Image: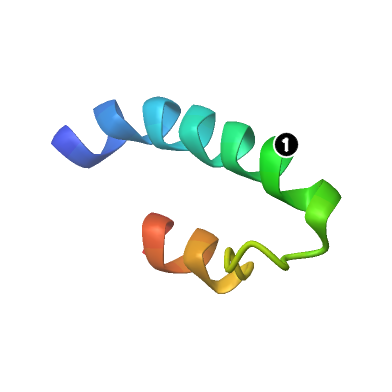
Amino acid sequence: NALQALLPQIREEIREEFRTGSGSSNASGNPPTSYYSHVA
């Protein structure tokens, strides 16, 4: 399954995005909903 193969990479990207964006209280325009749209 291609999706299952991509999931670890997507999770890494999301983790990086949260690490850099969480400190700004989502003021940078990265709402948590982008996480769900990325996974779904």
Q: x and y percent of residue 38 in the render?
A: 39, 57
Q: Residues within 10 Å of mark 1 (few under 14, many from 20)?
A: few
Query: Which image quarter: residue 20?
Result: top right
Nearest the eye: 31 or 1? 31
Q: x and y percent of residue 27 in the render?
A: 72, 68
Nearest the eye: 16 or 24? 24
From this view, report whether residue 24 is shown above or below residue 14.
below
Please state the total of marks drawn on the protein image: 1
- The residue that label 1 is drawn on is 19
Q: Is residue 6 left or right of residue 22?
A: left
**Amino acid type of the residue that numbered disc 1 sits on in the rendered structure:** Arg
Nearest the eye: 13 or 40? 13
Secondary element at tag 1: helix
- The residue at the point 40 percent across, 36 percent down is 10
Residue 17 appearing in the image: yes
Q: Is residue 1 left or right of residue 7?
A: left
Residue 1 appearing in the image: no
Q: Residue furthest left?
A: 2
Q: How is the image coloured?
A: rainbow
> Where's the N terminus, which quadrant?
top left
- The residue at the point 55 percent across, 73 percent down is 33
From this view, report whether residue 22 is shown above or below residue 9.
below
- The residue at the point 43 percent across, 27 percent down is 8
Q: x and y percent of residue 16 in the render?
A: 60, 32
Nearest the eye: 32 or 24? 24
Q: Is residue 27 left or right of residue 36?
A: right
> Where's the C terminus, which quadrant?
bottom left
